[in-house]
Image (cartoon, rainbow, N blue to C red):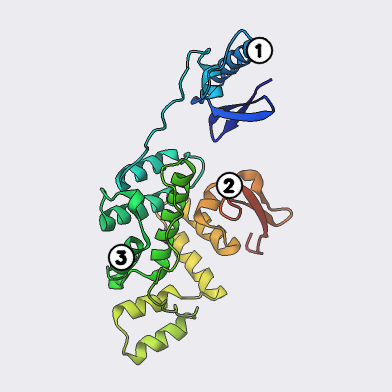
Amino acid sequence: MASLENRAGNFHVVFRFGGQKYSRSLRTKEKKTAIASVARLEDNLRRLELGNLTLPDGVDLPTFLLSDGMATQKPEKKQGPVNLEQLCQAFLVSIPKAAIEDNSRRGIEIHLRHFKRVLGWRFQIRSLGQGDLQRYVDKRSKQNGLRGNKVSPTTIKKEMTTLTTMWNWAKQLGYVKSEFPKKGLRYPKLVEKPRFQTWQEIERKIERGGLDDNQAAELWDALFLTLPEIDQLLAHVEQRARGSFLYPMFTFAAHTGARRSEMLRSQIDDIDLSAQMATIREKKRVRGKHTTRTVPLSQFF
């Protein structure tokens, strides 16, 4: 008997014949269509076992059964994407919408645009070598990033992680055969970020002078608010916020440490004022799995 499996929204049929397990995508998201295809396959499988159908040599068994025995030749393998533009488009289409957050998808798209811009959208993907990747790293490290600074090694490594993921996906589909040639890449040295500091510490360093606007901005990025300063910030938001939702969100973030996306996924039952606990719905702690964590609510609530 054949079984039906739903994999990332697409139905697959799984069955055994001659002691071997077979799996084939039915290329449909409609369950009724998938059930009909499985019924047709099972009927042809019985005919094959009874000798009413003959499997020609070299023919792909799942294709033969799903085509009612009409497929008598192995289907030719599609060549797949050839250049970087084609590969990027195919990779983005392959990612189910529910698989990643919208922000993560936008980040992937930005990384891929950088690769197409630096390497060229017509770049032949099967010719990619370590030298091409090193050329990418060298060019990106000389380009401007935030606040006039050069693109950081951390950003370049994130971009390389995206390309690695796409390459491994392409390798699984047979579009490329070699391993991703990133071994031995050399990145610029990292510049340590300023430690977290209080408002007073940052003001003292700026008043001493000698810092440009970018250096001062990096210090403010490391600002650590004290509890009284957090109260002052929340009072300011309560008075000046243009949207009624902003003050509750600022308050929830300040007292629980929840991310914006986590707050947006919150439901009424996630907030237990009696127990002074909140359930945070996560998406990033465990890859491919929705998880939760509980945090205590402060006396403010």
Residue assigned mark 2: 288
In this view of the protein, which residue sits in the foreground, 240 or 197? 197
Q: Residues within 10 Å of mark 3 (few under 14, many from 20)?
A: some
In this view of the protein, which residue sits in the foreground, 82 or 153? 82
Between disc 3 and disc 2, the foreground one is 3
**Which residue is the extreme one toward the top?**
52
Label 3 residue SS: helix
Q: Label 1 amino acid?
A: Arg
Residue assigned mark 1: 46
Looking at the image, residue 58 lies above or below residue 209: above
Q: Label 3 amino acid?
A: Arg
Residue 93 drawn at (x, y percent): 40, 38
Between disc 3 and disc 1, the foreground one is 1
N-terminal of the pair, mark 3 or mark 2, is: 3
Looking at the image, residue 300 lies above or below residue 195: above
N-terminal of the pair, mark 1 or mark 2, is: 1
Q: Label 2 amino acid?
A: Gly
Residue assigned mark 3: 135
Q: Residues within 10 Å of mark 2 (few under 14, many from 20)?
A: few
Residue at image point 55% right, 20% down: 34
Residue 255 drawn at (x, y percent): 59, 63
Label 2 residue SS: loop
N-terminal of the pair, mark 3 or mark 1, is: 1
Q: Residues within 10 Å of mark 1 (few under 14, many from 20)?
A: few
- Residue 88 placement, left or right of 101: left
Structural distance between the alpha carbons of marks 3 and 1: 58 Å
Structural distance between the alpha carbons of marks 3 and 2: 33 Å
